Amino acid sequence: MLTSIRAALAVSLAVCPGIAFGQTAAFVGLPIGATVIEVREIPLSAHANRALALWMEHPEKHPRLSEEPGPDEEREPYTCPEVTRGWFYRGPTRVSLVDTLTSKVTSTVEIRVDRVGGTLDEFDIPYRIKSAYYRVDPPLRGGEGKPVIMDLKDYNGDGKALEFAMFDAQSCSYINTQLIGYSARRDRVVQYQIKLKSEGNKENDGNSKPEFWLDWFLLQKPIRPGVWKYTVSYNSGDSGTFDIRYDPVQECFVGTVQWKQIP
């Protein structure tokens, strides 16, 4: 029995992240209708027999164009939201930690997005896109290719390449970013919270509401490992100076944002 499970998982790992739309991997604990988009093994230095699986429930496929342009035809330029989604799948999105010896899901986080009117239990995962925010390896077609979503790096500055960033361009002014990764200490998938104290804003002064998304954050270069300080100017006429550090005990980001009105 165990041999057959390992064989099934080996097939899943072989076809992911290039798994075809509509296929499901042999992971115990995924619901009916789950489609695995990508699988990324955790380095042995962090933990043996672990992998992250990105999957969606009943995803809808959204091509950018109804027809593929010819080689000499001019391609329609990306809109601002398309720079992070391109040709995409849409649906409830999850990231699970999998025990690769048993193929069992051991923990899962949900990827939700804030939109006008509330929080949506869905996300757009590109399956073909230009290289801008996600890594895109050859072969390319018209400058587009299959992205690597779970491109593990050391984002939090702890010296371990166990995290990946997700991007959501809501407009030309906002590129929301979220960090997901593997906690070796807790042996589970982690969705890193961001706890910011707001200063200089009368409506939100002193408030510290934990969030998973923060615009532009993971696109900023830290001033040293685990520490960021940067300023973002907005079309509203406000500017925010963000002072953020990674707290390894809580496994989250904490800091302040100082708001100012641009003259």
Image: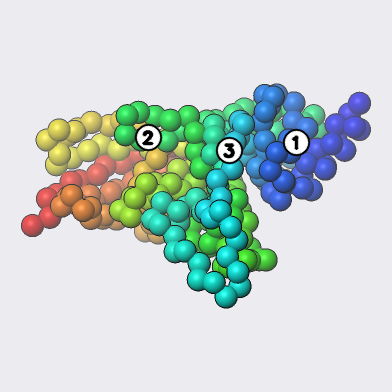
Report the amino acid beneath label 2.
Asp
Q: Are marks 2 and 1 in contact (CB under 8 Å)?
A: no
Determine whether, in the image, residue 137 is placed left or right of residue 134: right
In the rendered image, residue 261, in percent from the top left (x then y), is placed at 12, 50
Residue sitting at x 50%, y 38%? 123
- Say if residue 86 shows up in the picture: yes
* Secondary element at image label 3: strand
Sequence-earlier tag: 3 or 2: 3
* Secondary element at image label 2: strand
Report the amino acid beneath label 3.
Glu
Residue at which label 1 appears: 25
Tell me the quarter of the picture where residue 23 sits: top right
Q: Residue furthest left?
A: 263
* Secondary element at image label 1: loop
Residue at which label 3 appears: 60
Sequence-earlier tag: 2 or 1: 1
Residue sitting at x 42%, y 35%? 113
- Say if residue 157 shows up in the picture: no
Residue at which label 2 appears: 114
Q: Nearer the viewer, residue 65 or 203?
A: 65
**The C terminus: image quadrant:** bottom left
**Spatial CA span between label 3 and label 2:** 19 Å
Image: 120 above or below 77: above
